[in-house]
Image: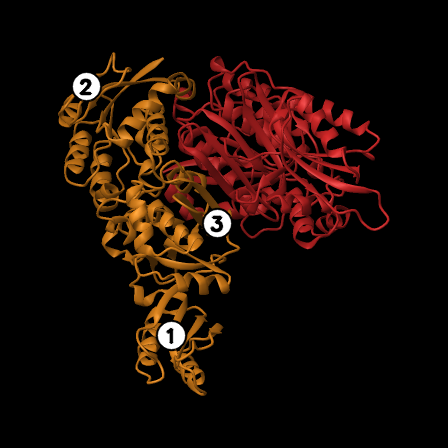
Chain colours: A orange, B red
Amino acid sequence: MRTVNIGICGFGTVGSGTFAVLNRNRELIRARSGCDIRVAQLAARRQILSSNLDSVSVIRDIFQVVENPGIDVVVELIGGTTTARELVMKAISRGKHVVTANKALIAVHGNEIFAAARDHQVIVAYEAAVAGGIPIIKSLREGLGANRIEWLAGIINGTGNFILTAMQEEGRKFDEVLRQAQALGYAEADPAFDVEGIDAAHKLVILASLAFGIPLQFDRVFTEGISAIELQDMEFARELGYRIKHLGIARETESGVELRVHPTLIPDTSLIAEVDGVMNAVMVKGDAAGPTLYYGAGAGAEATASAVVADIIDVSRSLNCSPEARVPFLAFSDASFNGKPVLAIEDVETAYYLRMQVLDRPGVLSQIASIMSDRGISIEAIIQKQPRPGENHVALIMMTNRAREAELMAAVKQIEKLDSQAGKIIQLRVETLDR
Amino acid sequence: MRTVNIGICGFGTVGSGTFAVLNRNRELIRARSGCDIRVAQLAARRQILSSNLDSVSVIRDIFQVVENPGIDVVVELIGGTTTARELVMKAISRGKHVVTANKALIAVHGNEIFAAARDHQVIVAYEAAVAGGIPIIKSLREGLGANRIEWLAGIINGTGNFILTAMQEEGRKFDEVLRQAQALGYAEADPAFDVEGIDAAHKLVILASLAFGIPLQFDRVFTEGISAIELQDMEFARELGYRIKHLGIARETESGVELRVHPTLIPDTSLIAEVDGVMNAVMVKGDAAGPTLYYGAGAGAEATASAVVADIIDVSRSLNCSPEARVPFLAFSDASFNGKPVLAIEDVETAYYLRMQVLDRPGVLSQIASIMSDRGISIEAIIQKQPRPGENHVALIMMTNRAREAELMAAVKQIEKLDSQAGKIIQLRVETLDR
């Protein structure tokens, strides 16, 4: 049996999870992979206490792993995009295969990294970069390989979904749930990465490349966070038969590719609307397979390790295959990259939920409806609440049909100027996920 | 670019779907696979009307495909286990790779087929055999390769799920919905394969082998159909917070492997309880990844073709790889097959839903409870209905804790002998799917 020597760089949550899984399931992994996968070297800044370190060379300098001629596969688990990038590029230049869990690295520097890997004929595997233990990269890149992917939509940030679920189910406000998520260790002290959608944008960029064959274009993702979501909008959404989820959405249209992360109303009859707490799920619409959905833990030491080790097994198995036999890094051969542009958010077509504060008097609704209709926007549903005692304004909730965002924004601006409408209009995008 | 010549045997639903997908997505498949995948020959009993047949040799004798030296991959889509077996064994002996969508063939003759394929160093791929367009074989065999799989549970027969969903949502009886399913073309004229769980058993046997590394053992699956499900049990289940689904369940325990297909009460908070209509889903519990779920269309021309073509791409890509670099047919190398026996249903441990008809008088419940407790079975929940006017008996619904099936059966027999209990006790298994 062939021995494959791997070097693990980084021994934080994912690093120690990976080491634990490789040790615990050693026999089983041997039986599945046909290789003896051995952690030959492990580099970490802190001291490692483990009873399974007998034959492992533990060092402090991650770059020694890259220079070690005995290492076949470098596993990058340090995170970040500066040192990690340097490490991965060095590993590639030394002819090492790379496994990484680093979504930011792939989303931001993936084009450069894959080009170098191609030149040096090595594999860079990154299943763990998106949705933790869910084998979504493999499913998109291989399992759905026969399909033209029409769109995908994912709950790909567990912290954000935990917050929205707690708000929805317990009627608690955003700030309060965020503090709880931080106390539980789900959210970082600086929660922007999670709640502003940056983390989800990293993952969406990767999924969209795999789906549509476009290069990675992180700077082109439209991102809107969940910090402004109010409980009353969750309640109105529920009345209309919807739930609010923070989705990453990618869709190929005639004119380009949509890449957007934002709070979204989705029908409560859709399976993905039932994905609660820290769980992740990705829904993919293929022209042949139809809609499929992949659900599981998106983070955590062992869920992420599950994906890292699956990649290690794949790489180990195919070490002696010719590069032509490998699945292309981003699913498509470079030569066939899709040249479609990423659409500006103004050019995206979607339906909208609007909440206005309008004067409770005759004629107001028809005034608003006529502004909408002048711009070709039709109204799908309306909820108008009774005014509270002593108040002149009432909440008017409106669901529109699909329209170009630029048209909708223009209509909203026009309505905001009416005397009969007070303050800013709340706007949330709506997706039915059925076409 | 390498050309790969495939021969399609069978041009029914799946065959014509496969041909359509290969034609429609030709460019995209070329960009993903790096190969020019060409349908060189097509064998079908009936005449084929298609505008895309220019370069395809259309014949009537499927065995000519196997003998054609120009064919690299034989795609078996004729179904059944006699001619299909002969065809596949001949293809293997001629050194052809095989792609098949035939679950019965793999479940019943897979051990023999894979042994022959090993001897002749060819691939036999069968993603389409389980759950149509959902890449569940790949997910289990590769995506979750790092995990010790603890259990899996699947809705893997769309017809059965369509019937149960319609009964649940529309309050219609089994027979009536079955007739509708037949009229819609979901169920065969002889519906036994679907509603008695044979079809699900075929698929479960395959999934269990992949999960636990046991040989295929179709004759060891316990199978119970859905034809006896009554609407009132669906209603009581709902009161208790459960839904009834026809599940295929496989679990590895200390003493052996459970392999069973039966109607099952599952908590309505579980995502798989929300899988309705003809859709399929498989939930897999891995020791590292935790629970993951895979959802999609389990049947239909193009959903199944999606899996067939994914296999064709995989095989085409790795034609020149050494056999050692291939994923083992049943996930594990033969030498490492798990020797655990499949447990008899009497030795399976599960919770139960029981519906009795008992006399409405003091002492009856305590009599029943004491029979249960003597056998170590504890009661988790009870619903007792008011008697209808003029009736002496009332419905008594009981949920037990997990117990060995043999103990439960003995207790049920004993209770059925009581004067205070009338008729047969309805028994349904309960799974919480949380451990």
Name the element at disc 2: strand
Going by the image, does B346 lie left or right of A8?
right
Q: Do the CB atoms of the residues marked 2 and 1 lie less than 8 Å apart? A: no
Name the element at disc 1: strand
Q: Nearer the viewer, residue B183 or A43?
A: A43
Sooner in the amino-acid sequence: mark 2 or mark 3 = 2
Q: Which residue is mark 3?
A: A274
Q: Nearer the viewer, residue B125 or A29?
A: A29
Identify residue type, mark 3: Glu
Q: Position of residue B261 (x, y in %)?
A: 64, 32
Badge 3: residue crowd in 10 Å (few <14, some 14–19, many ≥20): some
Label 2: chain?
A
Q: Which residue is mark 2?
A: A58
Residue A356 tag number = 1
Residue drawn where x is 36% and y is 62% of the image: A230
* Residue B224, image quadrant: top right
Q: Do the CB atoms of the residues marked 3 and 1 lie less than 8 Å apart? A: no
Q: Is residue A28 visible?
A: yes
* Residue B1, image quadrant: top left
Identify residue type, mark 2: Val
Vertical side of A268 occupied by A289: above or below: above
Going by the image, does B100 lie left or right of A321?
right
Sooner in the amino-acid sequence: mark 3 or mark 1 = 3
Label 1: chain?
A
Name the element at disc 3: helix
Q: Position of residue A50 (x, y in %)?
A: 26, 18
Q: Position of residue B337 (x, y in %)?
A: 50, 15
Badge 1: residue crowd in 10 Å (few <14, some 14–19, many ≥20): many
Residue drawn where x is 42% and y is 53% of the image: A170
Badge 2: residue crowd in 10 Å (few <14, some 14–19, many ≥20): some
Going by the image, does A164 lie left or right of B199?
left
CA–CA distance in space, label 3 to label 1:
28 Å
